[in-house]
DNA sequence: TCTGGGGTCCTAGGACCC
DNA sequence: TCTGGGGTCCTAGGACCC
């Protein structure tokens, strides 16, 4: 009779844990990781959470605490996190035939029909111990018949120390016991808006939601919430998907350190985003059919000095050529530019993505019009992989906008020069 | 209530066609 | 020009996720 068994591993405090892997001297020390430009806190170690450092708090607001408690502060280092994430995902394949990476620090895996596993909790502990030993990252593990229940179980694994970080939620009785004590905030797919609406309908726990009128949920909130409720009852609605489709859009944007009304500064920042986006496009063998440029002032709508604009252009042929994308972006920017406003955010979106370059032996690949363009872009990508050495004039020379990363850790695992040394 | 920089999907409504 | 019914495509906005 055995139904589906879907596992979920979720790394604990992932970015903070990554930083600790290479700094054993920081064991037990509260630690935070900052967003781009060292703006606000995006990851906290267990010790930092215990001190009450909130998620997302701007770093200047916790200067006192940093000083007082000796909190270790790190700029984000996505090269490092991405690499450790890859290692964890590879490792997980030793334990499960089908793995779906869901985010940088989470993966679902399917154990349905794997006969040898009689004790799921024990199996979960082995996975956990193995990842901790070989990569150094602590994870939580849960098993359930649906993804939504596995998420709920994983929450419990983190919340209740007694579980030892592993929860087997395949038993319906355990499901409803946990659901009764789980607020809607712990339910995957229920955000603040839905929570407030549901509260007015006297739906306050995962259990309430599971037992509510699903037909009514669909009418009032759409099919996704209906599916979430169904999954809480053990009915699978979100299937495993081992090979998720490639991205449908790429966005690169940033808040400027200093708001500015200087066209050239905005232009340079924009060009930089375009170049980053184009690189990421080429990495996946994609090309873009449309580009959108947007920017806005810092004050929000309502105030008189607010201005926000965006404009898009479609390409006749999809392209991945940084030069073409830069030209288009700058021309769009000119069209919507207005002087005398203080701009604080600018970005680019590449969409209508075309994957044909990602498919080997594609019959129509020749559409990628200019073979020289591909060669040139590949060359630039190869050179810049090591360190950004070639850049486009539009990106600017002095590059004042370059992100602040005052507290960045070395790229321990992805650059030879920065390998950790053993004395 | 939003901090920040990415993303996804769904739904409603308008334009347009037969 | 309107009436009816049926359909597609596109966009904007709203919800969610990490």
Image (cartoon, coloured by chain):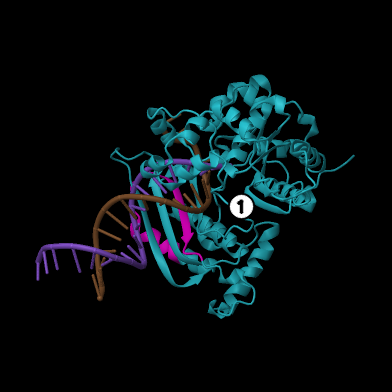
Chain colours: A cyan, B brown, C purple
Q: Where is residue A109 in the image (x, y as percent from the top left)?
A: 68, 48
Q: Where A265 falls versus A58 (above or below)?
A: below
Q: Name the residue nearer the viewer: A43 or A123.
A: A123
Q: Which residue is at the far right?
A: A423
Q: Name the residue nearer the viewer: A95 or A211.
A: A211
Tag 1's secondary structure? loop
Q: Where A178 falls versus A337 (above or below)?
A: above
Asked if residue A105 lies in the magenta stretch, the reply is no
Could you tell me which chain the residue with mark 1 belongs to? A
Q: Name the residue nearer the viewer: A282 or A181.
A: A181
Q: How many marks?
A: 1
Instruction: Locate the C terminus of chain A by quadrant.
Output: top right
Asked if residue A337 lies in the magenta stretch, the reply is yes
**In the drawing, does residue A27 fall left or right of residue A309?**
right
**In the drawing, does residue A331 fall left or right of residue A287?**
left
Q: Where is residue C8 in the image (x, y as percent from the top left)?
A: 36, 67
Q: Where A255 falls versus A279 (above or below)?
A: above
Q: Where A144 falls versus A67 (above or below)?
A: below
Q: Name the residue nearer the viewer: A17 or A165.
A: A165
In the image, the segment drawn in magenta is: A328-353
Dividing the picture into quadrants, the one containing residue A73 is: top right
Dividing the picture into quadrants, the one containing residue A280 is: bottom right
Residue at 76%, 46% in the rendered image: A412
Q: Position of residue A204 (x, y in %)?
A: 46, 28
Residue A102 in view (yes/no): yes
Per the image, the residue denoted by label 1 is A240
Residue A407 in view (yes/no): no
Residue at 48%, 60% in the rendered image: A350
């Amino acid at each position: 009779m055995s139904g589906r068994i879907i596992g979920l591993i979720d790394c604990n405090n992932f970015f903070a844990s990554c930083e600790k892997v290479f700094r054993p001297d920081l064991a037990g020390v509260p630690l935070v990781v900052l967003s781009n430009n060292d703006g606000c806190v995006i990851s906290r170690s267990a010790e930092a959470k215990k001190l009450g450092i909130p998620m997302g708090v701007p770093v200047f607001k916790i200067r006192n605490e940093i000083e007082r408690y000796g909190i270790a502060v790190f700029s984000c280092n996505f090269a490092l996190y991405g690499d450790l994430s890859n290692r964890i995902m590879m490792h997980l394949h030793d334990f499960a035939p089908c793995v779906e990476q869901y985010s940088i620090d989470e993966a679902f895996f399917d154990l349905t029909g794997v006969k040898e596993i009689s004790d799921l909790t024990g199996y979960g502990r082995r996975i956990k111990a193995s990842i901790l030993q070989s990569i150094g990252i602590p994870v939580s593990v849960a098993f359930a018949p649906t993804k939504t229940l596995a998420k709920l179980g994983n929450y419990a694994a983190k919340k209740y120390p007694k579980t030892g970080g592993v929860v087997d939620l395949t038993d319906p009785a355990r499901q409803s016991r946990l659901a009764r004590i789980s607020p809607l905030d712990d339910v995957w797919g229920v955000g603040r808006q839905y929570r407030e609406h549901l509260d007015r309908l006297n739906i306050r726990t995962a259990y309430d939601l599971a037992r509510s009128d699903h037909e009514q949920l669909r009418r009032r909130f759409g099919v996704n919430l209906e599916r979430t409720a169904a999954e809480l009852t053990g009915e699978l609605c979100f299937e495993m998907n081992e090979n998720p489709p490639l991205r449908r859009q790429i966005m690169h944007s940033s808040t400027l350190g200093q708001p500015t009304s200087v066209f050239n500064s905005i232009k340079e920042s924009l060009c930089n985003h375009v170049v980053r986006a184009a690189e990421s496009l080429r990495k996946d063998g994609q090309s873009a059919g449309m580009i959108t440029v947007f920017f806005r002032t810092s004050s929000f709508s309502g105030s008189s000095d607010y201005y926000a604009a965006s404009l898009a252009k479609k390409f006749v042929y999809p392209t991945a050529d940084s030069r073409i994308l830069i030209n288009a972006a700058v021309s769009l920017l000119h069209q919507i530019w207005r002087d005398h406003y203080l701009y604080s955010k600018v970005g680019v979106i590449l969409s209508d993505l075309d994957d044909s370059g990602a498919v080997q032996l594609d019959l129509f690949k020749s559409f990628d019009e200019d073979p020289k363009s591909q060669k040139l872009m590949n060359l630039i990508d190869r050179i810049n992989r090591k360190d950004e050495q070639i850049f486009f004039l539009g990106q600017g020379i002095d590059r004042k906008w370059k992100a602040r990363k005052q507290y960045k850790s070395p790229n321990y695992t992805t650059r030879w020069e920065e390998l950790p040394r053993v004395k």
